[in-house]
Image: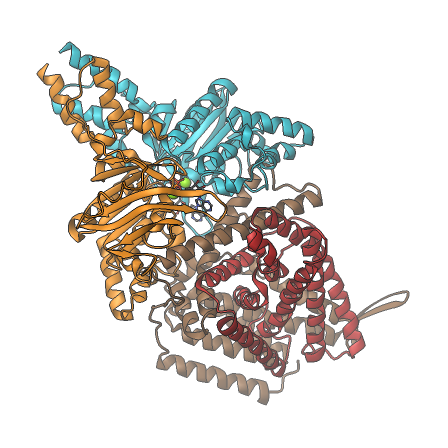
Chain colours: A cyan, B orange, C brown, D red
Amino acid sequence: MTISQQKRNEHACNICAADANELIHVDCASHIYPDGSLGIHGMCFRVLEKEIVALCGPNGSGKSTLIEHLNGLLRPTSGSVTVMGKNIDLSHADIWRDVGVVFQRSDDQLFAPTVLDDVMFGPINMGISVEQARTEAMGALKAVGAENLSDKMPGYLSGGQKRLVCIAGVLAMKPRVIAMDEPTSDLDSLHAEIVENIILNLKKNHGISIVVATHDLDMAARISDRVCIVKDGSIIAEGKPSSIFYDKNLIEMSGLRQPKVVQIYEGITKNLGIVMENYPITADELVKTIAPMIRQN
Amino acid sequence: MTISQQKRNEHACNICAADANELIHVDCASHIYPDGSLGIHGMCFRVLEKEIVALCGPNGSGKSTLIEHLNGLLRPTSGSVTVMGKNIDLSHADIWRDVGVVFQRSDDQLFAPTVLDDVMFGPINMGISVEQARTEAMGALKAVGAENLSDKMPGYLSGGQKRLVCIAGVLAMKPRVIAMDEPTSDLDSLHAEIVENIILNLKKNHGISIVVATHDLDMAARISDRVCIVKDGSIIAEGKPSSIFYDKNLIEMSGLRQPKVVQIYEGITKNLGIVMENYPITADELVKTIAPMIRQN
Amino acid sequence: MNELSPHIPDLDLITLYSEKGTTLFSRISPWTKALMLVLIILFVSIDKSLILAVCLYLIVLALYRLSCLPIKKLFQWYMMPFIFVLSLVLILMWNEPGNPIFSLSVPYFSLTLTDNGLLLLLTLLFKSLATVTYSLFFLMTTKYNYFSAMIYRVFPSPIDQIFLMSYRFIFMTLKMVDSMIKALRSRGGGLLKSTRRQSKMFAEVFALTMIRSYDRADRVNKAMEARGFNGKYVAATRIPGIGFGEYFTMLVAATMAIYLIWFVKLPF
Amino acid sequence: MAHIHLPDGAFSIQWIITWWIIAIIILGLCLYWLKKVKKIDNKKITLAAMLTAASFAIFQINIPLFGGVHMNLTPLIGMLAGPAIGAIIVLIVNIFSAAIGHGGWGMIGANLLVNVTEVTVAYGIYKALGKINLDTFSKAGIGTITGVLFGNITMILIILISGIQGVNQDIPNTLYGLSLLAAVNMGVAIIEAFITGYVVSYIKRVRPDMLAEVTPVAATAK
Ligand SMILES: Nc1ncnc2c1ncn2[C@@H]1O[C@H](COP(=O)(O)OP(=O)(O)OP(=O)(O)O)[C@@H](O)[C@H]1O
Ligand SMILES: Nc1ncnc2c1ncn2[C@@H]1O[C@H](COP(=O)(O)OP(=O)(O)OP(=O)(O)O)[C@@H](O)[C@H]1O
Ligand SMILES: [Mg+2]
Ligand SMILES: [Mg+2]
C-alpha cells in the first residue's frame, strides 16, 4: 500500500513541477476569506492530462474553495495557481476557457430563460458567432443526452435534468478540464449513474480531465484515477483509490467513513482473520474477489 | 420473500383502516399542483406507532409532496388524510403539533436570527410562555447535541449543524411523528451517521415515529422498519427492507438501484450459483452472512 | 461576498466583528449605543460649525479605532457616502455668497467657489462621515441577536416581522447572488461586452434573484406554518439594560453638546 | 431609488422632524390598510421580507457599466409588491442602507417619501398601461422612467422646501443646481428602465403569477 502522503512543507510541490502533461498546478496556495475563515491552507494539487481526480473530504474541508481557485474565481492569498502553464495572477482573463466549473447547486448556474440560451452563453462569450454558438450548444446538449430539453425553461426541469444542462453549459466551451462540485448529491441513483457515465465518457471520448469533489466515496472509488483526501484546507493524502480507501486510519482521521465495499471486504477478512490480498473498490471487484474464496475453500 | 404489493384499487386502504396504533393514514390521496403536474396519485400510506418508515423513490416521484400532506401543508385534491384520528380537512389547525416536518433544505427552515429563537418558534406558537419555550428549546437542542450553538446565527453554521438545529426545532414541539425530507443528502458520512443515530434515538428514547424520504437506499436499509417504494406519485410496494431491497425487478423498475450491500450479496450468490438463504441489508449483516460461508466450505 | 463591490460594507465581515468583539464597546448596552446614535443625529442636524463637525468625527473615529475595528476597510466604505455628499453639494456649492476663492468663466456661464461654498462642502462631509462611522461602529460592536431583539421591541407588527425576517434573508440572498455571479464569471460573463448584452445579463440575474426569492418565500413560509406560524414570532434574546455609568456618560455628552452648540462662539 | 441618499446633516432639525412625521403618517395608513382592509396574510409577510432582502442584495451588485452602477430597482418593488407593502419594504431598505452609511438616519423620513413616490407611480403607471396593447418590456420601462421622474421631482421639492443647511443661495440658483442633479439621475434612470423592462418581461415569461399585483388577469388565467 503506497500512499504519497504529502508533508506540509514548502517543497512538496517542487518535486512534481517538472511534469510535462500537467494541466493545472496549485502550488502551496492558501486562501483566507475576508471574514478570516481559512478556505484552503498550503494546498498543493495538480491535474494531469486525461485523468479523473476525486476530492474527498468532510463538510467545510475546502473542496469548493479549491475548485473556485482552478479557474480564477478566487485568487490565492498566498501561493500560486498555474493553469496550462499560465499563472492565473498574471493572465487570468482566459482561464475560464480552459477550466469549466459545474457548481454544487445547479440553480445558481442556470440563469437564462431557456436551456439553449443558457448553454450558448459560454460559447458566445468566447466571441464566436451566434449561429456557431448554437451548433456548439446543441452538440454539448447531445453529448449529455439532453438535446430534447433545449427549448425548456430551466426552472421547470427536474434536479437530474438541471445537472445535465449545467454540464452541457460547461462542455459547450470545450474546456481542457472540468471541475464538478458534488455533481450527484441531490440525484437519485439512476441519475447519479447517468452523471457518472458522462464523467467517464468525457474523459474517454473528449480527452477532458475531470476534478470531482464529493462526499460519496463509493462513487469516487468507481470513477476516479486518483483520490485526494482534503482536510482542514489541504490535501493530506493522495493516491490510487485502492490504496487510499484501504487506509482506515487515514480515512477516519479525516472525518470520513470508508466506502461500503471496503468496509465489507475489511469486515470479512477481519472476521476470518485472513490477510487481504486484493483491494477491491467497486461492487464488481468485491464480488470477483470473494466468490473464488468461497469456491476454492 | 413477501412483499405486500398494493394493488391500485380503491379498497387497498380499507384493509388496514382498523389498525389501532395507527398515527397517520393517507387514504388514496391525489394531489394535482396548480400547473397541472401530478404530485401524488392514489397514494395510500400509513404511519404506525414507534416505527421508522423510509420513502424511497426517484427524483420527482412525489416523496416531498407526500410529506407535505402529512401535516396539512398541502391538502389532497381527492382522497383523505387522517392524523391521530382527525381528518385534516375538518380539523387542520392542530395537525402541526402532532406531525413535525424537517425540510429538504435547512436554509429554508432556519429563518430566525438566532438558533435559539428558531428552536423556540414552534413551542411559542403552541401557546406556552417564553420562559417555558426557552427550556423546551434548550432541551431539544441538547437532545441533538447542539446546545452550544444556541446563540449562533443560523447562516454561519455548517451544513451538518444546520440540519441538527432543524431537527431540534421540530423536536421542541414534542410531536408524535417527525417527517424528514432527505436529511442526509448534503452531509458528509460522519454527519450523516450522527443524523442517523439521532433518528434511531428519537424512536427509541422518545417514542416518536419517523418518516424519512431518501435516495440513499443503504441508509434506508440500515435504519428503517419498513420501506415504501414511491413511483409516479404512489406507493408501488412496501415491506421490510430485507424483502423489498432483494426484489431486483421491483427496484430497477422503480428507477432506483439496489443498495450496495444487496448488490454485492446478490453478485456473490449469482457468481457462485448458490441460493440465497439470508437477506443481509447492512454491511455488518453481510459480513456475518458471508464469513461463515467462506469458513465452513 | 467577493463578487460584490469592495466599497460596499460586507455584512459578513460586519457580523464577524460584532460576534467576536470583546472590547468595552461590545459589552455596553445596545440601548445606550442606540440612544447615542440619536444624540449624534440631533447634534449634526443642529450644529452649524465645521470645527464641531470635525471634532465629532474624530471622537467617533477614535471610538471605532478603540473597538479594534478595521480602519482600512472603513476608508474603502466611505466611498458611497462621499459620492452622496458630493453629488448633492458639488452642484450647490458654487456661487454661494462669500469671498471668492476660485472662479471659472466660460461664455454664458460663470462658476465661483467662495469660502462659504467650500465650508459647506467640508461641514456636510464631516457630519456625514461622523454618522456613517458611528453607524458602522454600532453595527460592528453589537451582536446580531441584540439587534433582532431591539427591532422586535421597537417596530409595530407586521413591520417588525418583515424586518426581522429580511435581516436573516439578506445573508442568504447575498450568498445566492454571489454564487450566481460566480457561475456567470466562470463562463466568461463578467467581462465588459456590449452595453446591451451586459445590461441584459444583469437583468437576468436580477430577475432570477426576484424569482428565487419568491420561491424561497414560499418554502420558508411552508416551513414556518409547519411549526404553527400564526403571524407573530418572538425574538426572545434579553438585551442588557443601560447601566448607571452609561446614563451618566450620555448626560455629560448631551450637556457638552448643548454647551458647545449654543454657548461657544467658533470662527467657523 | 433616486440614486441619491440624502446624508445626515443636510437638513435642519425642524425639517427632519417634519418629513419623519409625514412618512410615519403614510406608513400608518399603509399598515392600517394592510391590516384592516387587505387582511395581509402570513405568506405576504414572508414574501415582503424576501423582496426586501432581494432589493438590498441587488443594490450591492456592481454593474461594470460607465465605471460602476448600482441599481435599487425601487420601481420594480412597486410592480411586484404594490404600494402599501412597497412602502414598508423601502422603509426597511432605507434603514439597512442608513446602517451601512448609505443615506442618513435622520433623512430616512425624506428618503422614504421619495421612494414611496417611485413605488406608487411605477405601480400605478404599469397597472394603468395594463389595458393598453403594449409589450411588458415597454410597460415596465415606462413605469420605471415615470416613477424615477416623479421621485426626482419629489426630491427636488423636498430639498427646495427644507433647504440644505449652510446653503444661502436664492431659489432659482438652487433649483438650477438641483435640476442638473435630476438630469444626471434621469440618465441612470434610463439604464434602470431598460433593466427593469428586461426583469419584468423575464418574470412575466417564467412566473407570471408574481405580477399578480399589477396584472390580476394573468394570475387568474393561470
Ligand atoms: N464565502 C465564504 N466566506 C467565509 N468563509 C467561507 C466562505 N466559503 C467557505 N468558507 C469557509 O471556508 C472553509 C471551506 O469551505 P468549503 O465550502 O470550501 O468546504 P467544502 O469542502 O466545499 O464543504 P462542503 O462539503 O460542505 O461543500 C469552511 O470553513 C467555510 O466555513
Ligand atoms: N410546487 C410545485 N408546482 C408544480 N409541480 C410540482 C411542485 N412541486 C413538485 N411538483 C411536481 O410534483 C412531482 C413530485 O414532486 P416531488 O417534489 O414531490 O418529488 P420528490 O420525490 O420529492 O423528488 P426529489 O427526490 O427530487 O426531491 C414532480 O413531478 C414535480 O415536478
Ligand atoms: Mg462544497
Ligand atoms: Mg423531494
Residue with the most extreme left position: B296
Q: Quadrant of ligand 1?
A: top left
C9, A138: nearer the viewer:
A138
Residue C206: percent from left, percent from top:
58, 50
> Considering the image in quadrants, where does the C terminus of chain A appear?
top left
Q: Could you tell me which residue is drawn at 31 percent across and 63 percent down? A: B120
Residue B113 is drawn in which quadrant? Answer: bottom left
Question: Front-most of C220 and B84?
Answer: B84
The residue lying toward the viewer, choosing from B7 and C21, is: B7
Please tell me which residue lies in front, D25 or A11. Answer: D25
In the image, C122: left or right of B159? right
Q: Please, is residue C153 above or below residue C254 in the view?
A: above
Horizontal arrangement in the rendering, residue C215 relative to residue D165 (left or right): left
Q: Is residue B175 left or right of residue D73?
A: left
Residue A126 visible (yes or no): yes
Residue B121, compared with residue A47, is above or below; it is below
Q: List x then y, in percent, for residue B253.
A: 35, 27
Report the label total. 0
Where does residue C9 sit, x and y in percent of width and height? Answer: 53, 58
The N terminus of chain A - image quarter: top left
Which quadrant of the figure has residue A60?
top left
Residue A249, percent across and down? 23, 32
Is residue A12 in view from this perspective? no
Q: Residue C250 falls in which quadrant of the image?
A: bottom left
Give the residue displayed 64% in from the left and 30% down from the top: A134
What's the residue at 48%, 67% (across, down)?
A: D40
